Image (tube, grey):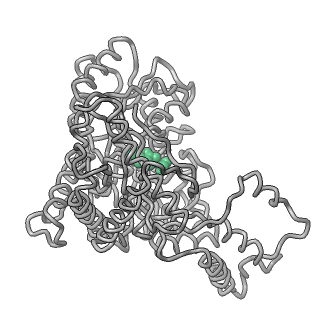
Amino acid sequence: MKKYFFDPISPNFDVFVDYITKLNDKVEQYIKTNMARVPSSITEKYSDLLEDENLSEKGEDLDAVFSRLAYYSQGLIRWNHPGALINVNPPASIPSTVASSYFSLYTPNGAQDMSTGYLLTTELAVVKMLSQLAGIDYKQSGGYFTFGGKSTNIHAIKHGLQRISKDYATNGLSGNIITFSSTQGHPCHAEACNWLGIGDKNCVRISTNKMGEINLEELEQAMSFAIEHGKKIACITVNGGTTIQMTIDPIKKVVDIRDRLVKKYNLEYIPRIHVDSVIGWVWLFFKDYDFNTNPLNFSNNALQKLKRQMLRISEIKYADSFGVDFHKTGFAPYLSSVYITKDKTEIFEQNHYKGISYDELEYGNYSPFQYTLELSRPLNGPLAAYVNLKTFGITGFQKIIGNLMDTSEYLKELLNNTGRFEVINDNDSDGFVTLFVAKETKDSPSFFELNNLSAAEIEQFGQYSYKFYLFLLEKQKKGECWFAIDYSTGYHRLSDGKKLGVLKAYPMTPYFDKKAAEKLVKDVMIFQQEFDKVKDTFVVKEVPHKPRPFVYR
Ligand SMILES: *Cc1c(COP(=O)(O)O)cnc(C)c1O
């Protein structure tokens, strides 16, 4: 079996390279470079596939095992492709993937530094760089990598609970706990309460204004009401860039409300404020961008949006903690999430660990496992994040994110110019996702006039976009459509409060440039003309995956 292991005496690195090349050769056979999704001929259900999946006595040939892996790559979305427009799923940069994969050969365990050499410096360095970026004191702040943005939210609430009861680590939950988020907040804000034994019903969702920002008056009233009824507020989770609209709540104003209520009610604890910035942290890179001379030549629309987002997220320094997902807007492979807290002593409570100050940390005493949720810890996240931060630098991130903004503004303009598509999130989102509807004719009403129509007419309007989405899915399956856009299920509320599903184009790759946007709109128009010929009788047959359901409710 030695042949499968890295030779310690005469390093056989060529075997590693050889195997990677082999795997790549096999996967490439399934790829069509002009398609975002790897074509798939698999029709069986998992139960059928699993019929062939059994342990063998002697082990199989690596070649056969790799062939099987390549076979399973059918249907895979290639996020580097400009046609991959489904979700916040970035292509991972090559350097970050190399660092993450390469060091896996040495299985460094991030539980403590003793066996990992100085590689854990990358975790400390990322925490320092992010603290500086956020404008907080990196000698007082602390943080660590953990298993996803969801985990960063779990940590925030846990640390909020510690503030409520000083003996939380020993005795567990006490009191009547409540947390706050907004209706635009991620589902995991409530799921975190579920995991922590608070119950997801105790994540109260505050309504939002037209821009999707949390209603401050309602928040203050709800917090006051909770306090007056004996509840303890573990955490207010503020949006620092929601998943689709990329909405950033007024962070400072929420902090002011919190501070006011602490005084007014003479609270013995300070309710935690956490910014779920797993997506929106990336606008921090623009805090020193010269918006006047605009050295990277972003279009005016993109520039204004970038500036607004930067100003909003720069208030992150007033919060107690925040989260960052490098596997989202940091272009690293999974998983690469960081939780950062302004006061590092708060992360040491676990196991009653005393903690070590910034200046006293040295090789041999950095032992995150003493206080992290994980014991064994992968180093893939810190390595990948570190490599991207270092190699891209501030300007590199400005270029990637700025160009996504720029190209998206261009895409919106092109779509609107067709007269057959209407962009619906231009005025309520400063992000780079395009939400739009397909219109049956040029004279169809605007999305914003739908409330003048009857429910049946609105349904028909919505069905047209929905069926077009199904039509495109079928074309994808047939290998006739190179891009994969999504159907956003009822994100958008009409003014009567009802939700209607719309089309979504979520670009994430630096390869999504103006040319790609032009080709996208040109082809989407051609497909629409084809669709119009069959729309009355169209029934979707072949699809790459189970489609999302139609939404009008
Ligand atoms: C993706 C996302 C999460 C969850 O993060 P994971 O890394 O998927 O666990 C939380 N909040 C927001 C706003 C997100 O977009």
Quadrant of residue 388 in the image? bottom left
As drawn, is 473 to the left or to the right of 415? Answer: right
Q: Residue furthest left?
A: 292
User: Between 361 and 37, which is closer to the camera in this rendering?
Assistant: 37
User: Between 226 and 213, which is closer to the camera in this rendering?
Assistant: 213
Residue 339 visible somewhere in the drawing: no
Taking the spot 46% from the left edge, 60% from the top edge, the residue there is 123
Taking the spot 53% from the left edge, 42% from the top edge, the residue there is 353
Taking the spot 71% from the left edge, 53% from the top edge, the residue there is 45
Residue 169: image x %, image y %? 54, 31
Q: Quadrant of the C terminus?
A: top left
Residue 287 visible somewhere in the drawing: yes
Residue 203: image x %, image y %? 43, 27
User: Between 444 and 155, which is closer to the camera in this rendering?
Assistant: 444
Q: Is residue 280 above or below residue 448?
A: below
Q: Is residue 146 above or below residue 399?
A: above
